[in-house]
Image: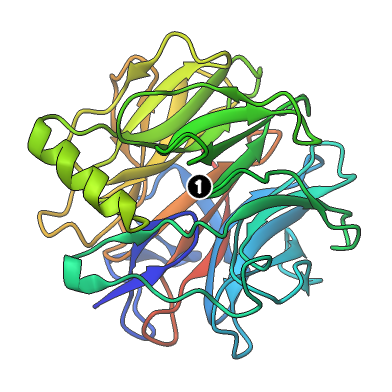
Amino acid sequence: MKNLLLSCLILITAAMPGELSGKPKTGDDPLRLARETHLRNIRQLTFGGENAEAYFSGDGRKLIFQSTRDGGDCDQIYEMNVDGTGVRILSSGRGRTTCSYFFPNGKRIIYASTHLTSRDCPPRPDYSKGYVWAIYPGYDIFSTAPDGSDLKRLTNASGYDAEATIAPNGKKIVYTSMQHGDLDIYTMDLDGKNIKQLTNEAGYDGGPFFSYDNQWIVYRANHPKDQKELEEYKALLKENLIRPTTLEIWIMKADGGGKRQITHNGAANFAPYFFPDGKRVIFASNMSDPKGRDFDLFTIKVDGTDLQRITFNDTFDGFPMFSPDGKRIVFASNRNGKARGETNVFIADWVD
């Protein structure tokens, strides 16, 4: 059974209720599977609904995330303490929201929202064309005060603007936009000024994150390999759709130079994030499942070597992020779900 979490765009495979597959488990750490040796003391932070894309605050004390819960029809932005307490909504409750992130200094947050187009959730994509993602043109990026007040619009170009994160030094926002007709990566100042395009290859470039030293950006990409693929990509894009079955992980310098592909497996690889040392990347992929339904976490060096599998749950694990000190990792997972389609946020100690 497949469930589409309409967030920063990825397929989530729903677990059966109460299922933590990939047994055996560890007795003193019941949410961790025995082969998950890089993780310790896994704790579940959310319980019920669809919760994903949880990212640490600059001081490591809070998490910002998106969730469909409490009878809502689509994702809104929430925050909580790293122990799962203090959950509160930050977005307006209008439209669909996604891709939230803290300013490193804690003074504001950013997220994307469609609320200027409509107060209602936008329609789901047309699956008669197969498995596709909706690239809602109503998405724009906004910043607010930490409590959700003082909403300011940062993007106003025509078409999709989303998938925004912020450099650790707090100087630049990196994001995905269709402002020039294709899905490319851009940077801008925290107030939305000084926009710079970093990618221009035909195809989708998105999901970018800065390295801890602010010098590099890691992202996911799908560049059509031949004319047939390119024509299909363009035809879908005209309908604000893309097909995400093949995504590879890339890195580039913060100015857009030095682009280098670091995975070459033909799978759906997404949600990459740098290790604090800048020498490795952690990401989610379905490369180990011939059916493409099971996503796990993997690590790889930035030169494309030393691929290691981190999680072994038989359903979905994704959206990993290290704490600022590198000692903990937060991720979303179907493990231990109580109902079909449930995705929750988990935190664990990282063992290197």
Give the image location of residue 308, x and y in percent: 30, 34
Q: Considering depth in this image, is 227 or 348 the residue closer to the camera?
A: 227
Residue 66 drawn above or below residue 165: below
Secondary structure of residue under mark 1: strand
Q: How many marks on residues?
A: 1
Q: Considering depth in this image, is 31 or 138 the residue closer to the camera?
A: 138
Indicate left or right for 350 with 33 as reference: right
Q: What's the residue at 58%, 56% (across, down)?
A: 139
> Quick one: label 1, few (<14), some, or many (20+) residues within 10 Å?
many
- Location of residue 130 by image quarter: bottom left
Q: What's the residue at 33%, 24% (across, down)?
A: 201
- Return the residue found at the far top: 258
Q: What's the residue at 38%, 44% (across, down)?
A: 270
- Return the residue found at the far bottom: 71
Residue 216 drawn above or below residue 291: above
Q: Amino acid at mark 1?
A: Pro
Give the image location of residue 118, x and y in percent: 62, 74
Q: Would you say residue 287 is visible in this rendering?
A: no
Give the image location of residue 315, x and y in percent: 30, 66
The colour scheme of the drawn protein is rainbow
Residue 21 drawn above or below residue 208: below
Q: Would you say residue 140 is visible in this rendering?
A: yes
Residue highlighted by disc 1:
320
Which part of the image, by quadrant, shows the N terminus? bottom left
Give the image location of residue 138, x and y in percent: 56, 60
- Location of residue 16 by image quarter: bottom left
Indicate left or right for 255 with 245 as reference: right
Q: Considering depth in this image, is 241 or 269 the residue closer to the camera?
A: 241
- Location of residue 227 by image quarter: top left
